[in-house]
Image (cartoon, helix red, strand yellow):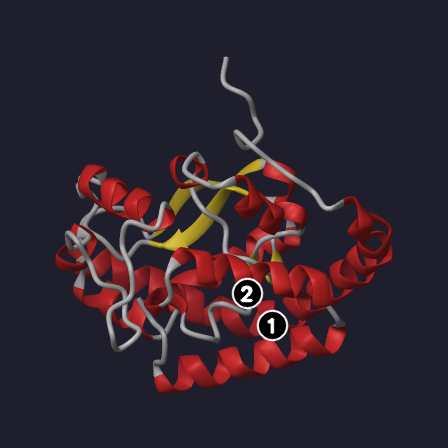
């Protein structure tokens, strides 16, 4: 039987005591935000689900196993943006190359794709809009309420991406993954994976309530202007 934790995980012990009380305060903040937003977002989420079902065959909600805090596995919720019969094999190959650094940014800072991830051409009409506005992430409010995610934190990877981590990458697993994060407001898919991890480690080391608010504020701006989507 496969382990229910990530293949490798390294924690910097000096952060443990600091994060014990931060974790409690952060959890209170997360639940409060979700409870305030949920009644407002529920009608929007219902409308999105209906549009997805009308636009293409298949369910409105997509679930996928991800690696969370300390290597724990959980099911993430997203709105489906890709056709239901999409074959993920080539996309896995691309993303594993991305994690291992075989795909580097070009002179303009954009990721040079050695082979284009096929998912883009399989986006549904509604899915393209949802991804552009990052609305496909809204169901993760349920992951936050369940204690599997936070509003702010490193984005969670799937197990076959974590299998390609270098040991230092695993320190991003010290905290709950987030719906948005420091890397997401500083380039997102335009960044090489090592740079994303550096942002995530910086977040873990420098976490504060005000840093979370700053990231949330920048996320709202990025979503409004469609920056970093993809």
Q: Is residue 15 visible in this depiction of the protein?
A: yes
State the SS at label 2.
helix
Depth check, front residue: 31 or 182: 182
Q: Is residue 175 left or right of residue 123?
A: right
Q: Residue furthest top?
A: 1
- Judge whether 151 appears above or below 5 on screen: below
The residue indicated by pointer 1 is: 37
Among the 4 quarters of the image, the one containing residue 201: bottom right
The residue indicated by pointer 2 is: 199
Depth check, front residue: 198 or 178: 198
- Judge whether 153 appears above or below 61 on screen: below
Depth check, front residue: 217 or 17: 17
State the SS at label 1.
helix
Depth check, front residue: 47 or 226: 226
- Judge whether 10 appears above or below 119 on screen: above
* Sequence-first tag of 2 and 1: 1
- Judge whether 153 appears above or below 62 on screen: below
The local crowd at label 1, few if under 14, some if 14 to 19, many if 20 or more residues have their Cα within 10 Å, is few
Residue 8 coordinates in the image, percent (x, y): 56, 32
Q: Residue furthest front?
A: 107
Report how many numbered discs are placed on residues in the image. 2
Residue 141 coordinates in the image, percent (x, y): 56, 59
Residue at x 18% of width, y 59% of height: 120
The local crowd at label 2, few if under 14, some if 14 to 19, many if 20 or more residues have their Cα within 10 Å, is some
Q: Is residue 69 left or right of residue 108?
A: right
């Amino acid at each position: 039987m496969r382990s229910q934790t990530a293949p490798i995980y390294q924690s910097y012990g000096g952060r443990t005591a600091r994060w014990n009380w931060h974790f409690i305060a952060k959890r209170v903040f997360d639940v409060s935000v979700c409870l305030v937003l949920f009644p407002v977002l529920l009608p929007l989420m219902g409308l999105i689900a209906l549009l997805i079902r009308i636009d293409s065959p298949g369910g409105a909600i997509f679930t996928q196993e991800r690696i969370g805090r300390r290597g724990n596995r959980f099911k993430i919720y997203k709105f489906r943006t890709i056709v239901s019969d999409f074959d993920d094999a080539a996309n896995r190959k691309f993303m594993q190359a991305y994690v291992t650094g075989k795909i580097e940014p070009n002179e303009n800072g954009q990721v040079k794709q050695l082979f284009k991830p096929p998912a883009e051409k399989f986006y549904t009409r509604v899915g393209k809009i949802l991804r552009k506005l990052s609305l496909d992430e809204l169901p993760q409010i349920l992951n936050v309420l369940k204690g599997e995610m936070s509003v702010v934190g490193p984005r969670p990877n799937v197990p076959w991406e974590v299998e390609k981590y270098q040991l230092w990458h695993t320190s991003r697993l010290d905290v709950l993954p987030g719906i948005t994060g420091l890397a997401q407001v500083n380039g997102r898919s335009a960044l090489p994976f090592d740079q994303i991890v550096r942002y995530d480690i910086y977040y873990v080391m420098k976490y504060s309530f005000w840093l979370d608010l700053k990231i949330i504020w920048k996320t709202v701006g990025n979503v409004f202007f469609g920056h970093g989507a993809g």
